[in-house]
Amino acid sequence: MIDKKKQLKQEQKTVLVGIVTGGQTEQQLNEYLDELSFLAETAGVIAVKKFTQKLPHPDSRTFVGKGKLEEIKRYVSQHGDVELVIFDDELTGSQIQNIEKELGVKTIDRSDLILDIFASRAKTAQARTQVELAQYQYILPRLKGMWKHLERQGGGVGTRGPGETEIETDRRIVKDKITLLRKRLAEIDQQSFTQRKERGEFIRVSLVGYTNVGKSTLMNLLSKSEVFAENKLFATLDTTTRKVVFEQTPFLLSDTVGFIRKLPHHLVESFKSTLDEVREADILLHVVDMSHPQYEEQFTVVNKTLAELGASDKPTVTIFNKMDKYQAEAFDEWLEEDVKKEILTDLKQRWQNETNGNCVFVSATEKTNVDELRQTILNKVREMYRIRYPYKAEFFY
């Protein structure tokens, strides 16, 4: 595994960098950097400063302009405990090399950070293989520019010293490794496919959603199982499937990896077998964190990702989770109860209209409105049995 050389040091301090380009607004960038800060925290890194710049397009050499890079350099020089700089967008190998030369500290981008988190959280052979493949795919086009960067990390590819011959040799090694990992992953995928086929004639339901919206908590609540749940991004990498029975009606419920903005396409490709649970599901439960300030954008990101996976036309129930937290943050304590009820009624009516009535508002941690959620899922499952396995449906009433 190459994650050993990539894993970030605990309690490392970092600065975050992002640019405003095109139709993007400064507010959007600040929201993206807030999320990047949460990603850094998940990786065990503390973000102490954010740098932003408006540019028509990224600088080809250093991503940000010369003046902004000088500003970052001054800050890093004045704060000796800053050992890392993280950019919110993907950097090329040469950009990483140029930035590190100027700043004198390790520099990574958002994709590298996400890969690091995935590497630290991959537990099964399948997840570890998927992450390792994505890491090598990320490194390959950046091999030359990242040469010293890789050499400093120690171990693995890129430790023999700079030089064109060595780089070309390592490029071949990386390509061979990618081929080997793809073959190994194909074998694992076939095993996973066989296991899914052996589950019998059960309706399959998959929890999907943005990362950290409470899918694993809902999984525990609905299946009465103990699935790992944590208030960090990408707490779940491996798909967990449980058999659930509501009123004599059985079905399979799966918890899947969360989606996120700018998810590296290498990860999507590598996690194809995990995402097959979504593609092969009969019903999707799209979980939304109602308390998040950008919940609508997260809702859109997930729907776009589902469309890319070819799963956007599946019967879907949208679960607006964390309603207790939403009300605590959105409502002033002096707000009259009638006004609160009116706001909630309008909110729920809006989303009822947008989802054609296929939505439920709950709090998984407080177990609020769970009965309605169970009944909604049960109705969908029974309806799907009538379509898929009509000869079985009569037994589930």
Image (cartoon, rainbow, N blue to C red):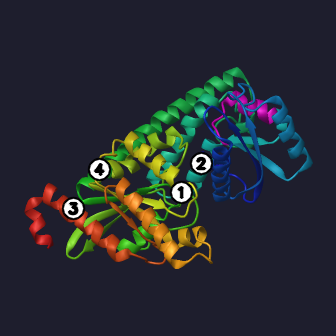
Identify the mark at residue 202; answer none if there is no mark. Answer: 3
Q: CA distance from mark 1 to mark 2?
A: 9 Å
Q: Earlier in the sequence, mark 1 or mark 2?
A: 2
Q: CA distance from mark 4 to mark 1?
A: 24 Å
Residue at left offset 75%, top offset 60%: 11
Q: Residues within 10 Å of mark 1 (few under 14, many from 20)?
A: many
Which kind of residue does numbered mark 3 sit on? Answer: Phe
State the SS at label 4.
Answer: loop
Q: Residues within 10 Å of mark 2 (few under 14, many from 20)?
A: many
Identify the mark at residue 340; answer none if there is no mark. Answer: none
Q: CA distance from mark 4 to mark 2?
A: 28 Å
Which kind of residue does numbered mark 4 sit on? Answer: Lys
Cβ atoms under marks 4 and 2 closer than 8 Å: no
For this orientation, the residue located farthest to the top is 164
Q: Earlier in the sequence, mark 4 or mark 2?
A: 2
Principal secondary structure, stretch drawn in magenta: helix
Residue to which mark 2 is pinned:
114
Residue at left offset 46%, top offset 33%: 179
Q: CA distance from mark 2 to mark 3?
A: 34 Å
Instruction: Locate residue 271, reporting x and y percent.
Output: 44, 46
Left or right of 372, for residue 384: left
Instruction: Locate residue 182, reporting x and y percent.
Output: 43, 38
Residue to which mark 4 is pinned:
314
Left or right of 247, for residue 55: right
Residue to which mark 1 is pinned:
234
Magenta-highlighted residues: 88-101
Q: Which callout, 4 or 1, points to the residue nearer the camera? A: 4
Q: CA distance from mark 3 to mark 4?
A: 16 Å
Residue 172 sits in quarter: top right
